[in-house]
Image (tube, rainbow, N blue to C red):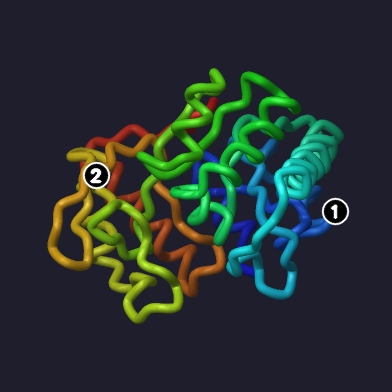
Amino acid sequence: MGDDAAMFRLVTSANVACGLHAGDPVTMLDSCRAAFELDVTVGAHVGYRDLAGFGRRSMDMSFDELFGDVLYQLGALDGVAHAVGASVDYVKPHGALYNRLFHDADQASAVVAAIQAYDPGLPILGLPGSELLVQAREAGHPVFVEAFVDRAYQSDGTLVPRSQEGALLHDLDSIVERAVRLAIKGEVVAVDGTVVQVRPDSLCIHGDTPGAVEMATRVRAGLEAAGVALESFAH
């Protein structure tokens, strides 16, 4: 949905869709090949079974349904990655599932259980304070905290829903400033002016955001100019 080839040259890790909310075998192959060639770490971007909605619609699922879907996606991407010399080195849920796992303990338990069953040592990336990371840490998984440079925040540390005006950020100067502040000070200003503590290990740019390549170029340059060393958190 974006210029993935250009983005791979700018990032240190890539969340690759596993076929249920986006992607297909050929796209996964292309992504894993590019990641391997450019030394970019591959993460399994698991989501709801919702191609039509790009995984951005919340779904009520039983434990077994969600457990099975996450397991299915991990196996699919890991198999493709293995075939081209790459590997899946972390997991990050996508879209509506990602947001729901902030507060939904039942769905978080299904996702963590699936990752645990597949690979007990696989790192998990998510929002600080989320049920996902709390349960992942309790299960013994390495956990890493993520922040978003292109999304607006609410005062509780969650993202402003995409259905609301102002959820997506577009001004590149302010985005670069936000990225540097996140990396150096570990904080972000919410829409109500509240300063939210985040302390991220990783900064996310959505590849399908219009102008994502230019945004990633500017953010990377801004971080490097501020003296921030860029490397994959899960490498």
The residue singled out by tag 2 in the image is: 225
Task: Estimate the spatial distance between the alpha carbons at disc 2 and disc 1, rounded to whole Å.
Answer: 38 Å
Going by the numbered disc 1, the residue's amino acid type is Pro
Identified at 40% across, 63% down, the residue is 215
- Give the residue number, with chain letter if any, for mark 1: 25
Task: Tell me which residue sits at (21%, 49%) in the image.
Answer: 196
Query: Which residue is drawn at the image coordinates 30% and 67% (left, top)?
Result: 172
Quadrant housing the N terminus: bottom right
Look at the picture and state if 89 lies above or below 29.
above
Q: What percent of the width, then of the height, locates residue 101? A: 51, 48
Expressed as whole percent of the image width and height from the top left, the position of residue 146 reads 41, 43
For residue 209, above or below residue 108: below
**Whether residue 7 is visible:** yes
Classify 10 Å Cα crowding around label 1: few (below 14), some (14-19), many (20 and above): few
Q: Say whether residue 148 is left or right of residue 211.
A: left
Front-lying residue, 128 or 107: 107
Q: Secondary structure at mark 1?
A: helix
What percent of the width, then of the height, locates residue 99?
48, 56
Classify mark 2: helix, strand or loop: helix
In this rendering, position of residue 231 left or right of residue 87: left
